Image: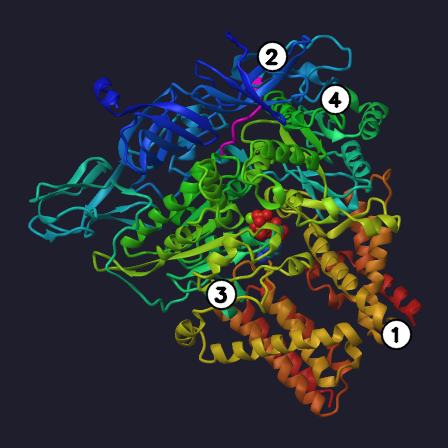
Amino acid sequence: MKEYQTINEISGPLVYAEVDEPIGYDEIVEIETDDGRTLRGQVLESNDGLVAIQVFEGTSGIDRKASVRFLGETLKMPVTEDLLGRVMDGTGQPIDGGPEIVPESREDIIGAAINPYSREYPEEFIQTGVSAIDGMNTLVRGQKLPIFSASGLPHNDLALQIARQASVPEDEEGDDEDSSEFAVVFGAMGITQEEANEFMDDFERTGALERSVVFANLADDPAVERTVTPRLALTTAEYLAFEKDYHVLVILTDMTNYCEALREIGAAREEVPGRRGYPGYMYTDLATLYERAGRIQGREGSVTQLPILTMPGDDDTHPIPDLTGYITEGQIYVDRDLNSQGVQPPVNVLPSLSRLMDDGIGEGLTREDHGDVANQMYAAYAEGENLRDLVNIVGREALSERDNKYLDFAEDFETEFIDQGFETNRSLEDTLDIGWDLLSQLPKSELNRIDEEFIDSYYVEDEGEAVEATAD
Amino acid sequence: MSQATQQDAATGVIESVSGPVVTARDLDARMNDVVYVGDEGLMGEVIEIEGNITTIQVYEETSGVGPGEPVENTGEPLSVDLGPGMLDAIYDGTQRPLDVLEDKMDSAFLDRGVDAPGIDLEKEWEFEPTVEVGDEVSAGDVIGTVEETVTITHKVMVPPDYEGGEVTAIEAGEFNVEETVAELDSGEEVSMHQEWPVREARPSVEKRTPTKPLVSGQRVLDGLFPIAKGGTAAIPGPFGSGKTVTQHQLAKWADADIVVYVGCGERGNEMTEVIEDFPELEDPKTGNPLMARTSLIANTSNMPVAARESCIYTGITIAEYYRDMGYDVALMADSTSRWAEAMREISSRLEEMPGEEGYPAYLAARLSQFYERAGYFENVNGTMGSVSVIGAVSPPGGDFSEPVTQNTLRIVKTFWALDADLAERRHFPSINWNESYSLYRDQLDPWFEENVTEDWSEIRQWAIDVLDEESELQEIVQLVGKDALPEDQQLTLEIARYLREAYLQQNAFHPTDTFCPPEKTYLILTAIKTLNDEAFDALDAGVPVEDLVSLESAPQINRIGVQEDYEEYVADIKEDITEELRGMY
Ligand SMILES: Nc1ncnc2c1ncn2[C@@H]1O[C@H](COP(=O)(O)OP(=O)(O)OP(=O)(O)O)[C@@H](O)[C@H]1O
Ligand SMILES: [Mg+2]
């Protein structure tokens, strides 16, 4: 391996070096500085004689005398089942003082695309115990379902609640420990130490750490490294899922920091920026992360992704949530108003969506009436929510009896259905039954999205009358 | 290519690599030639030539590829293999069959440097001639047929660039696609396999004005904003508003002969869904599995971006080929925005001068070239065929003022505007009836009037008027509440509510409601119209509006969509409504 001392330009996170041999695109580079530190980087562009290198740890401390070594391979993640229970930094180096990791294999972190023909359509219901999700935006194994949040909102509590409670009810053979076990891969990008502790403490408290792999790039770690962290996490997840049969839940937080790092690199390369300064290829780049969720025919395991992002300015048209929403299979909105009302978890179901819900629910999968109930609650909540503005202007008296019922429904929907607390684990049965209690406040004739057969078996008769009586 | 000497002549050397863009020196190549890049022989296409430097877009991942590696020219432009076997197939953006790739790579993950022809070259087909020795044939003419799938008879045609002549030999029998099935006195031999460069439209005699609707089985489309066979439509909308579901609905239920579905830069699971569902679903026209009329192209968002750029062309070329056989083909492209972004990504790697929002200056030209390949055509062989193109558009932030939406709207004649508010309220399909339009409406009315009902356009106009009035009234309601409106306007709002809930909304996931024949679309309107007419009569007779909006019989209207025996059901509803209302005064 040849060493070069040919750096001729250092700019932001990038180093340019002259070479006299062909260097491959994406190849890994080690840079040794004067003071003996070894920094790692990756080839971003390879021109005859000149390569651009992106340095993960940042370029501070590098001068033109630093020596550059090209390792002749792209970045690999050493993988083994022994990674479970381990904590690593954002570049995959263990930081938990544990034993050295003896890899079973080393996998390219770029990750080849899954052949769409080889995929299996995800339709296995995951019960998260959260009504807003199970009832209205059902998660299935192999789905990528991000949490759209904003600063100061309890997205971490929600993510932890899901990680703790996620289960697949009525495991077929009845044995709890079916052949595929559950594992969590946690990739932190630029979050604070405090937030990281929140996760680690919860993992430790619940014993989840043993079946977790943690990659932590914290707020004071190098930004460029953040482009690598999620890929390490996903490479590990794919290995556990498709080689070792685990059902892996990947939590990636905060994707916003990841995108900021992309923007920083793009700017350093003087690329033509896309919307709001983010690189034009950000959609493609994010897709190479998010699409690494799914199921594969003939394999037991699955990769389910729960990325978290904080929307700058609470704006979901910002490129980060926007491009994410265009790639993922739905999204869960954490809402500032509901949060200030004290609703826990403050999930706004109206803009939330699970695109894989329709095929993952219903008779034989969850419950026969699930889809209809969800549809009807959406419509009813939307109608009630819509009327709230009007009430502020004209007052409740000016509204018809029908409108008032919808207003009550919206109110109760938030307090009884959504606001369950971060510690409550509701079964799907409970979730749907609460749904029926609420829907039964409305006259049967309003339930036009529900099959008449289900109305006959689930509608709570006295509920409607009771409410009517109090309304008078 | 096997001969080393030949290789050398056309071989260049990689100069630089930047993502999907590679430059090579000393390569003897023409624009759009297909080349094999690097030691692994990754497929690429020449997109720029400047002096001794050739720029190539590579259709596979380029990690690890470096300067100094060889580039080999095939001397052929990017082409698709055309012949029997394209239906019931699933391809990537350069027409590599994904099932074959899985087999060859022996992996569920897409590896590099593996090539495969677009159609099976060994499979034997039962060829049935339709011409005889001595017949005169020219370019484009059909010389025989093959049962490609249970649904589709594949027409074997003389390639468009042939001279033609008298048939000197032709015989029925089992042939693979490379074997000669007919010989002409011009010396030309015809096989079942043709190639065609994807960036070039296949020739035709002329384009005609389309007069038949592409019936979609979707009420809001057929009823209000129909597209013609041979027409163009755009579906723009923010994420999660229903573009893909609408495209899937069209692919399932549209009365086209052939469907080419191009998943361009979108989700893997959405393609998997099609692969799993379509073989199980029945073609409403023939009762055969839907897959038997479908060709899928899946270049998902995580697959190479250059192949995303080409997948649209691969799709439209396949569509044109079936059009040449005299079929009505419908092509869905989900999403054309990802295609435009692929152009942008490559353009920026080429350091071209960016136009609006970083898109290349030729964006508008490429979009119109693509949509221009749609149409109702008189083919070279005298048959009539059509290609309808329906493109999804994914505007950033859901803002329709961006370049891809705007440039598309300048070309297409049908605009189905998806609306995030409607989607949030779970009003599906969330096609905004105020913003959407179809410029085909008038030219298609005669067909509907002849084939469905005489008063098709009349009752539609009534519905449009009610909906228009509703949106005006809604503005007032938002300020003063419903009760402040005069009684007749309150009743109009109630009628409009039924139009929205029973007519405009349609549940794609309900086994019956998912497909609504035009007759049913019409009957639903007549049921609401009956309610309207009877209720206004009652109002005139002094019945208070509160009673009119809480009828017992009216809510049944919302259930017509899910009824299989809808005719009887609608007749009963009309009777019930009439009886109930007339009983009130
Ligand atoms: N006609 C319909 N009937 C019932 N549900 C629908 C219908 N159309 C859309 N939906 C619902 O909306 C969801 C999102 O639709 P879809 O995936 O088509 O959005 P999209 O516009 O393609 O989004 P993206 O741009 O992110 O791909 C679906 O998963 C489904 O739940
Ligand atoms: Mg879509």
Q: Amino acid at mark 3?
A: Pro
Q: Nearer the viewer, residue A290 or B280?
A: A290
**Rendered residue at 79%/66% (across/down):** A387
- Residue at 60% of width from left, 56% of height from top? B399
Q: Which residue is mark 4?
A: A211
From the image, state whether disc 1 or disc 4 is nearer to you.
1
The residue where tag 1 is placed is A397
Check residue A66 in the rendering and tell me which mark sits there, or answer none: 2
Residues tagged 1 and 2 counted as in contact (Cβ below 8 A): no
Instruction: Name the residue nearer the viewer: B297 or B478.
Output: B478
Task: Determine whether, in the image, residue B249 is placed left or right of residue A146.
Answer: left
The image's mark for residue B438 is none
Q: Which numbered mark, 4 or 3, is in the foreground of this view?
A: 4
x and y, in percent, of residue B106 in the image: 45, 23
Residue B51 location, x and y as percent? 31, 32
- Mark nearer the viewer, 2 or 3: 2
